[in-house]
C-alpha cells in the first residue's frame, strides 16, 4: 500500500552538498521517501511525502527542508482534532 499526496506539489527539498549520509532521514520518514546511496541521501519518491517535517527536524546537517503543516499530515491531524475524515486529498494506491 502506498500513500500518495497531490502530485508535484510537495515542498520537500534536499541539499545533497550538505548531506553527510547519516541516514537519519530514512529512519524517521514514515513513508520511506528517502534512500542513502553512495554516502548521500536522495529523494526516492517525492510525491509520497506527507510533509510531516520529521526529516527536516532530525537532519543534523540541515540538508533537508520542508514546509511542515501544509500537506497530508496537517490534514490527518486536523481531521482527528475535528472528529472528521482527513481532508488532505490522499488516495491509497492498490486499496
Image (cartoon, helix red, strand yellow):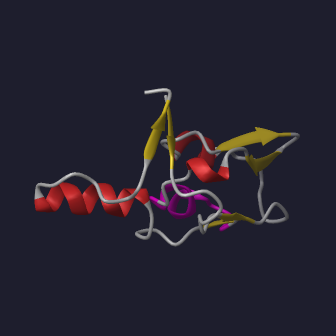
The residue sitting at 61% across, 52% down in the picture is: 47
Q: Position of residue 27 (x, y in %)?
A: 56, 40
In-front residue for pair 77/59: 77
The residue sitting at 49% across, 60% down in the picture is: 51
The quadrant in which residue 12 appears is: bottom right
Q: Position of residue 21 (x, y in %)?
A: 76, 48
The quadrant in which residue 69 appears is: bottom left
In this view, the residue farthest toward the right is 38
Asked whether, in this view, residue 74 is left or right of residue 44, the answer is left
Asked whether, in this view, residue 88 is left or right of residue 82, the answer is right
Q: Position of residue 70 (x, y in %)?
A: 44, 70
Where does the C terminus fall, quadrant-wise? top left
Task: Say how many tags the image has.
Answer: 0
* Residue 61 covered by magenta stretch: yes
In-front residue for pair 19/76: 76
In-front residue for pair 22/49: 49
Residues drawn in magenta? 52-62
Q: Position of residue 91 (x, y in %)?
A: 44, 44
The residue sitting at 81% across, 60% down in the picture is: 16
Asked whether, in this view, residue 86 is left or right of residue 90, the answer is left
Amino acid at each position: 500500500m502506498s500513500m500518495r499526496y497531490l502530485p508535484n506539489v510537495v515542498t520537500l527539498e534536499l541539499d545533497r552538498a550538505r548531506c553527510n549520509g547519516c541516514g537519519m532521514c530514512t529512519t524517521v520518514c514514515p513513508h520511506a521517501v528517502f534512500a542513502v546511496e553512495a554516502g548521500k541521501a536522495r529523494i526516492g519518491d517525492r510525491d509520497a511525502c506527507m510533509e510531516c517535517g520529521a526529516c527536516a527536524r532530525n537532519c543534523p546537517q540541515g540538508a533537508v527542508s520542508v514546509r511542515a503543516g501544509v500537506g497530508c499530515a496537517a490534514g490527518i491531524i486536523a481531521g482527528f482534532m475535528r472528529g472528521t475524515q482527513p481532508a488532505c486529498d490522499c488516495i491509497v494506491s492498490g486499496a
